[in-house]
Amino acid sequence: KHIIGIFTLCDASAASLRKVLKRPGIEGTVVIYIGGIAELFKSSRDEERLHLSSRKGFIKLALREGVDIVPVYLFGNTSILSVLRNKYLERISRKMQVSFTIFWGKFYLPIPRDDKLLYVAGAPITIPKISNPTQSDLDKYHEHYCEEIKRIFETYKHKIPLYQNKTLIID
């Protein structure tokens, strides 16, 4: 009936995600959009920015639960709509934890442009179960994740015309 009904939506807290991960099979799979509001206001049709350097909570959760991570990159998501990049709107969005901005696409309307999209799943990262991971553990697997994201970007960006000259910046 509703496409959203095929997904289990929950907040990104560790407690909520742990609950989903305990489910059997595909129902125990989670997809986390790591960047959120920070990336919304930093990325554009001209540059790709991932706010990822300080985002390690998903790595900690994966280590504690012993679940693999599959790095994924969606090419084209920053070109189908343009976003008004405004520090004031960014501050309000961060404070309210919901995006407040103006966006436009085709014909300067909120209709996505007909740009090509490409979804690429990278090589799964096997994560051991470590009940109390150290900072070294977090850094090791986070670096592995970031390297795989960079590899995906550099390997596949040529398949999307608007991405051929883009560079990936990880903040």
Image: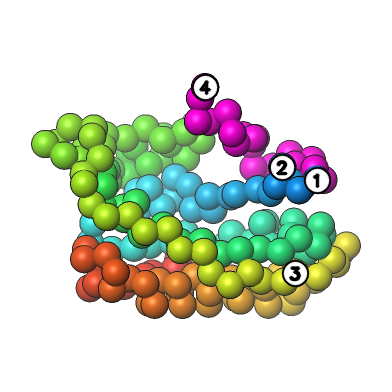
Residue 127 got which mark? 3
The residue closer to the viewer here, 32 or 102, is 32
The residue closer to the viewer here, 170 or 107, is 107
Q: Residue at x 28, y 73 (%)?
A: 158
Q: Which of label 3 and label 2 is nearer to you? A: 2
The residue under label 1 is which amino acid type?
Pro
Q: CA distance from mark 3 to mark 4?
A: 36 Å
Residue designated by label 1: 24
Q: What percent of the width, then of the height, locates residue 97?
A: 51, 35
Q: Which of label 3 and label 4 is nearer to you? A: 4
Disc 2 element: helix
Dots 1, 4 in contact, CB < 8 A: no
Dots 1, 2 in contact, CB < 8 A: yes
> Against 163, is 116 above or below?
above
Q: Residues within 10 Å of mark 4 (few under 14, many from 20)?
A: few
- Magenta segment: 1-23
Residue 27 got which mark? 2
Q: Residue at x 81, y 70 (%)?
A: 128
Residue designated by label 4: 1
